[in-house]
Amino acid sequence: MDTLDRRLSVAPMMARTDRHCRYFLRQITGRTLLYSEMIHAHAVLRGDRARLLAFDAAEHPVGLQLGGAEPDVLARAAEVGQAFGYDEINLNIGCPSPRVQAGRFGAALMETPALVADCARAMIRAVDIPVTVKCRIGIDGRGAYEDLRRFVETVAAAGVTSFAVHARIAVLDGLSPAENREIPPLRYDAVYRLKQELPELEVVINGGVASLDEAAAHLGMVDGAMIGRAAYADPAMLRDADCRLLGAPKRARPSRHAIARAMLPYVRRVCADGVPLHRITRHMLGLFAGRPGGRAWRRALGDVHRPGAGAEVIEEALALVPESDSPSRFAGGSPADGAAQPMTLARVPG
């Protein structure tokens, strides 16, 4: 049975949401669903599985995102992911990079919904954990709402019941991956309509969600919100997520200093195993975003390539940041009820 709470998740992001990033985010939010970077199914079967897939138990709930287009290969990779302990297998049908297009997977697969359905069916048969799909609202040439609904209905017929939908089309010819995250206009109305017309499916909205306020506003229209780059740039925004959106009891939110200190045992343990410090601290650069001392923090953590650098670098960096970020009385915004503030209409087209 699929019991994962997808009301809030952090999007899978290449070169970002690795195991060290996820462990760090877990010091900030205990309940937000986290995802791995996209890993190609062939890499899972042929590569160093421990390096690619191992993670700390503290990271749960955590999903494995796979890329690929061969049903049997994806099914075997999903089995491996389940054996490693992931809580969900997510199939990437949204990445628009030229390399991914050359392999005929990612967003390019929106052209072939029947093949995606075959992939999903094979994965569902192979594992006992949920299999979900992350897609765009369309691709160039197939950007009409009717194309999105046809794609989702075809894949849902194979047994997928949960879809994370990035509310932009992917332009496969002429835009870079970075441009594809910015230039195609957001069409939240298409994702809302999908949920309205297919209420039996779980629909999670992605794309341009920049705060918990915006996530809360989306939850009035769909089942979940997925935050990507905003959560990476300013991870402390997630401190209120558990109480405000995910049903946890109200509690004092941890200070940014406390979050950094909570990482110290992990840093000592992982660095002792030979992991270079910068692989961990690069994910922590945004912890003091917009705060006094934030620039000094980033500079200090950027200078961690010297041999033997370890947890003391973080302690030294903390000394450069005023400890004025005291915990609020309650997490979740207002002490009264933590109610979300409404999103401006300009952020929700249609």
Image (cartoon, rainbow, N blue to C red):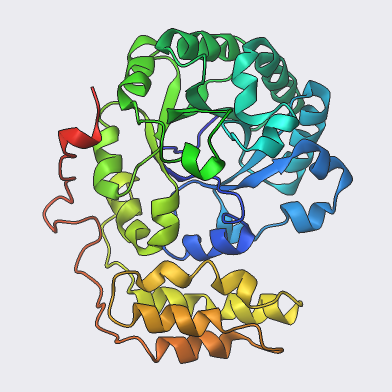
Q: Is residue 236 above or below residue 223?
A: below
Residue in the image at 60% along x and 83% along y = 304
Tell me where residue 288 appears, x and y as whole percent. 36, 73
Please identify the residue farthest to the left as the structure is shown.
336
Whole-percent x, y for residue 127 in the image: 72, 29
- Determine whether, in the image, residue 173 is placed left or right of residue 271: left
Q: Can residue 159 be seen at all in this image of the molecule?
A: no
Judge left or right: residue 212 versus residue 160.
Answer: left
Q: Residue at x 32, y 21 (%)?
A: 192
Query: Residue at image x 59%, y 14%?
Result: 155
Image position of 168 with respect to 85: above or below? above
Number of numbered discs on residues: 0
For residue 237, side relative to residue 121 (left or right): left
Residue shown at 64% from the left, 33% from the top: 129
Image location (x, y in percent) of residue 329: 19, 68
Instruction: Report the quarter where the N terminus lies.
Output: top right
Q: Most extreme residue toward the right, as rendered?
A: 46
Question: Is 307 in front, or is 236?
Answer: 307
Q: Which quadrant of the view contains residue 76? A: top right
Towards the viewer: 290 or 162: 290
Confirm whether residue 299 shows in the render: yes
Q: Is residue 341 above or below residue 264?
A: above
Q: Quadrant of the C terminus?
A: top left
Residue 87 in the image: state x and y as whole percent. 61, 41
